[in-house]
Amino acid sequence: MEENQYINRELSWLQFNARVLQEAADKTVPLIERLRFLGIFSNNLDEFFKVRYATIKRIDLAGKGGKSVLGGIKANKLLEEITQIVIDQQSESLSILDSIQNKLKDHNIYIINEKQVPKSQQAFLKNFFLQKVSPALVTIILNDLPEIPRLKDSAAYLAVKMIMKEPAPKKGNSPLVNKPLKEKKYVLIEIPRSIERFVVLPKEGEKQYVILLDDLIRFHLHSIFNIFEYESITAHMIKITRDAELDIDSDLSKSFIEKISASVKERIEGEPVRFVYDMNIEQDTLQYLMRKMEIDATDSIIPGGRYHNRRDYMNFPSLGSEELLYKPYEPLAMPGLVLQGSLFKGIAEKDFLLHTPYQSFSYTVKFLREAALDPAVKTIKITIYRLAKISHIASSLINAVKNGKKVTVQIELRARFDEVANINYAEQMQQEGVNLIFGVKGLKVHCKACVVERLEQGKIKRYGFISTGNFNESTARVYTDLTLFTSDQEILKEVNKVFDFFEVNYKVSRYKHLIVSPHYTRTALIKLISTEIENATAGKPAGIRLKLNSLSDFALIDKLYEASRAGVKIKLIVRGICCLIPGVEGMSENIQIISIVDKYLEHPRIFIFENAGKPKVYISSADWMTRNLDYRVEVSCPIYDSDIQKEIIETFEICWSDNVKARVLSIKQDNAYRRNNKPQLRSQFALYDYYLKKLEKE
């Protein structure tokens, strides 16, 4: 591995989160949306520490340098660098939060603390506290406990210190003789997750007050501790983040659901990897807690602001303020496919491409509802990675079983941080008679596909869809994704082969159309890139356009470097991690990369290979990461319909032309916005207009 050939994956991810922070800082973004981006930034950071930081810490504790897998940097040095970057980003995020809260005052919205509560609101707060908050509080007095109880992962706690009043001096003693030290009591109050973090107070004229639950508790500290004789009381917030790796039980007598359920519970007990505290906490309180909690130097210790778990800002209330939110766009219909009629009838005639959230996710739900009711449908097979809390997908599949269909669901119980929702639905579907498959040993199933078999004129005909995104109503409103609806019998026959692999893991099929991980994706992509190299060398049209969430596989990066050296023009749109360094003479001068972070989360994976003027176009569930290529079941699907090919290429170019929300990724790692002299083009808004015009042409 040559020096400076790759950007470290973790440092690249932190640069992605910096782009999220840029959205929170962007004064053109509506104020409440900016608060929500702060929440996304914080939530991202929590997951990063639970997973990536924890992994690097394990490498370090195992006494390994880790340079070969960490892009040329030692694990211990990387841990230090991450901590410093996060401290700087946290500081910036606090400054942004202060700025937003000051701006909200211009709109008569006041986020107040316990010292700013107007007298007119005190009765409301007292009643709210007594009725809702007080019964939910878990309060732990630490002094008399031999060790601190295990704190919950990512829960926020108020660390309370009471300095007790001096006992009265004994008779006959001078007050200055044998003066006892003032006793200190240390207490932890867990901030309840069952109550909304932001308490909206009754409106006073034009003024709208909001108080955080933490400050509401601070306001009532005396009510909580009135049995104690104290002379002063302070409360500062702390938070622990734990290693989120699941250790799967090897007990063969347990069902897979039981094993995953048990390991999710054990995650709460994982090793701490990050300790965040209010930088204004008293030193004696901090030292007491760190000693009790056995926080050591290999943990990331982050001095933070007054409030932690700022991920809750993702759900900051709208407060009826439309001007402080993005204008909602109604999801559009798909030209030529009518929700009120039979989708199968339309799909039998031609392929359709759904682009959510610009177009309505209702087509996916309607497809499954129709399959559940249609007497001619005999079987439904579908992969599920992340389900919504209330899932119409799951209810449609249960409905199909009740109507006598044979339903097979491959459900991934190890979809990180969504295990509980998936377990609940898995148990529900199993009880209703759905045939559940729990994946392949050693592999996560990440592909998104469905195939339906329908009896038509005595023969089985297949209908189905293949997607870049999860079949999830909630994320479909905020993630951009592509779904191909097709009745192409050759493609759907191969989707069936993927389900055969789930059932019989040792049987590996051959595929003519689909590119399937873990068996073929790496070699297929290298072959496709090699073809572009050959075409460029021969003077034929050559080019590669990719839209990905992440690009971190070193072997594929090396192949793209080889293509660049051969003169292949490469355009990359990468939302998150990008370990490739573009624009370096002799290595990557023909590679340009942008990243788009905006209102919606960019989620599709698109591969476009110029192929000497006859483009090969794919949509995929797979990022160009080692895990997606070698350790997951993924499906990349070719697009054969020329109109849909054209649509994908046109939408890619709209994104590539973004000069409002696109950042240029470069060796500088500075997230510089792309600016040019062309008319302003904000790709997500332009894409909505693109689909609106398509609909108007009908």
Image (cartoon, rainbow, N blue to C red):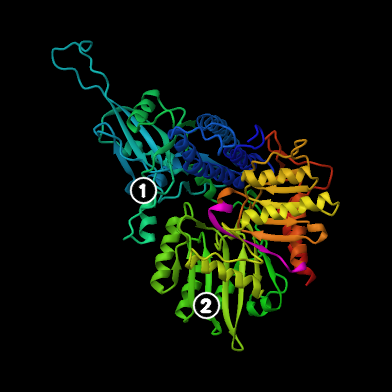
Q: Could you say whether the residue bearing mark 1 is in a helix, strand or loop?
A: helix
Quarter holding the C terminus? bottom right
**Where in the figure is residue 602, as x and y percent of width and height?**
64, 52
Say above or below: 46 vs 483: above
Q: Quadrant of residue 12?
A: top right
Q: Which residue is mark 2?
A: 379
Looking at the image, which residue is at 43% across and 42% down? 243
**Where in the figure is residue 260, as x and y percent of width and height?**
39, 56
Within 10 angstroms of label 1, few (less than 14), some, or many (20 or more) residues?
some
Magenta span covers which residues? 628-642
Decide whether residue 629 is among the magenta residues.
yes
Decide whether residue 275 is among the magenta residues.
no
> Which labelled disc corresponds to residue 266?
1
Say above or below: 393 vs 560: below
| CA distance separating discs 2 and 1 | 37 Å
Q: Are marks 2 and 1 in contact (CB under 8 Å)?
A: no
Looking at the image, which residue is at 65% across and 75% down? 489
**How many tags in the picture?**
2
Q: Would residue 597 be visible to someone looking at this image?
A: no
Q: Nearer the viewer, mark 2 or mark 1?
A: 2
Say above or below: 479 vs 695: above
**Where in the figure is residue 506, as x and y percent of width and height?**
49, 63
Furthest toward the bottom, the residue is: 457
* Amino acid at pointer 1: Glu
Say above or below: 75 vs 557: above
Task: Give left or right: position of 561 versus 476.
Answer: right
